[in-house]
Amino acid sequence: MTEQRADGKPADGTESHDPDFPEAFLSFMRQGWRDSSLPVGPRPEVPNHAKRRAALSAAFPGETLVIPTGREKVRANDTDYPFRPGSDFVYLTGDHDPDSVLVLRPNGSGHDATLYMRPRSSRQTDEFFRSRHGELWVGRRHTLTEKSTELGLPTADLSELDAALADLAPARTRVLRGFDPRVDAAVRGYDGPREQGQPARDRELAIALSETKLVKDEWEIAQLQEAIDATVRGFEDVARVLPADRGVSERLLEGVFALRARHDGNDVGYGSIVGAGEHATILHWVHNHGVTRPGELLLMDMGVEGRNLYTADVTRVLPVDGRFTPLQRQVYDVVYASQQAGIEFIKPGVKFKDVHLTCMRVLAEGLADLGLLPVSVDEAMDEKSGVYRRWTLHGFGHMLGLDVHDCANARKETYRDGTLGEGYVLTVEPGLYFQPEDDLVPEELRGVGVRIEDDVLVTSAGAVNLSAGLPRRADEVETWLAAQREAGPRLPG
């Protein structure tokens, strides 16, 4: 298949602003280059990826599985968004390069794995200096051998993928769809039942991958802890530049955290939410064009994505001038009590739903204490009512891993209606939000939003708070904020 960008231009073509090259220049560029090799060795996590591929293969004996990573996406004209590989693909290979495709073929006793990839641009053609994939433009790519050594996987040139996919029987092939239009078009979907807009057989592959990811191994937990520790440092960086006596832009604080994320990890794991004042009541506030004000609260929901793409997800609320007002503290303490109750309830075998109900009851009781519930706590908690949700809206949390909302394709009965297992990692993040235009709350509550979020590992002994490096209690938050301000700004390093 002829490769094209999403905007229809040839993937290896030139742009209108590129210069024409005379033959003398082309001839000169083709000579005098010294060959080099990358000093690569097997990554320590190679056995983990091999086990995951084996487990996936065992779930679909006798079938070919095709898992693409995805392609670069156009941001504007000839500029692309930074590439972020598909999470399921990374989970199975550890590879971060665009365009690659993993193919698992049945071999009688299991599956043979082949990674189809774009290899180093050869000096036998002009690609290395003329193509947008050439290493003089984007840097040195791995050779097939180098990539195979690093990942412990057989590799093949991406140019061979067409032939590899051409004869696959739809009834004996499953594709992780929606990542690479070339692959989706090359492998016809099986003419059978469809689920969520795709062949049910392919949907089953996506489900299996999500449900396998529910349990994190030791290496994954270490990756998450690394991302969370970097996130703690990022929150410290922000606190150190947050003035107590004047306003600064939300985007300044967003940028300070982003600097830590790029230095200590790969990037931010999601668009940072930096909500000053009434912006804290907007659950996914990402415009970040507001300004902090002394006397108001600042809600920050931010997470570093580590170098191996596992992400943290942490929320803290700070009193800008350093001290909670009595009413702010009352709301904050309700949310803290809700979160603490949820964390203490978590252990293997408890229902995900019951963690939710545990957190929500504490919120409902707090709303009753504030005089806001129009009915009793029991009535508000009745599934036919739920009126308390006017001031909270979202659930208590979600799974966390390679995606900030990990395991999203898992079945309802194994996730939201399922039970927690040892090795699960999830967020606990209750919140209360009083909209500025809400006439059912006292004026002094309007525009107040509080969410406290931590990343929790389920162990045989209960919950372990992986983000405990950031304080949660109101008095501890005040003390911590004062200490960060006293320490002063710092650069990552």
Image (cartoon, rainbow, N blue to C red):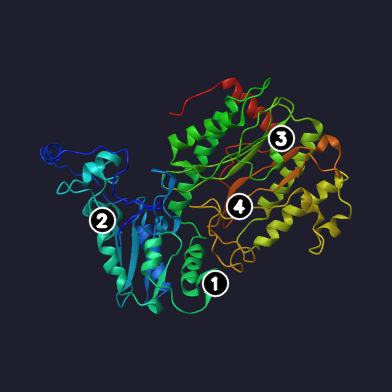
- Secondary element under disc 2, as helix, strand or loop, is helix
Please report contact status of discs 2 and 1: CB closer than 8 Å, yes or no.
no
Q: CA distance from mark 2 to mark 3?
A: 51 Å
Tell me where residue 99 sits by quadrant: bottom left
Q: Position of residue 247 (x, y in %)?
A: 66, 24
Q: CA distance from mark 4 to mark 2?
A: 39 Å
Q: Residues within 10 Å of mark 4 (few under 14, many from 20)?
A: many
Residue ID for mark 4: 463
Compared to 128, does 475 lie above or below? above
Nearest to the eye among marks 4 and 2: give it: 2
- Residue 38: in sight, yes or no? no
Q: Residues within 10 Å of mark 2 (few under 14, many from 20)?
A: some
Closer to the N terminus: mark 4 or mark 1? Answer: 1
Closer to the N terminus: mark 2 or mark 1? Answer: 2
Q: Residues within 10 Å of mark 3 (few under 14, many from 20)?
A: many
Closer to the N terminus: mark 2 or mark 3? Answer: 2
**Along the viewing direction, whichever of 414 and 277 lies nearer the viewer:** 277
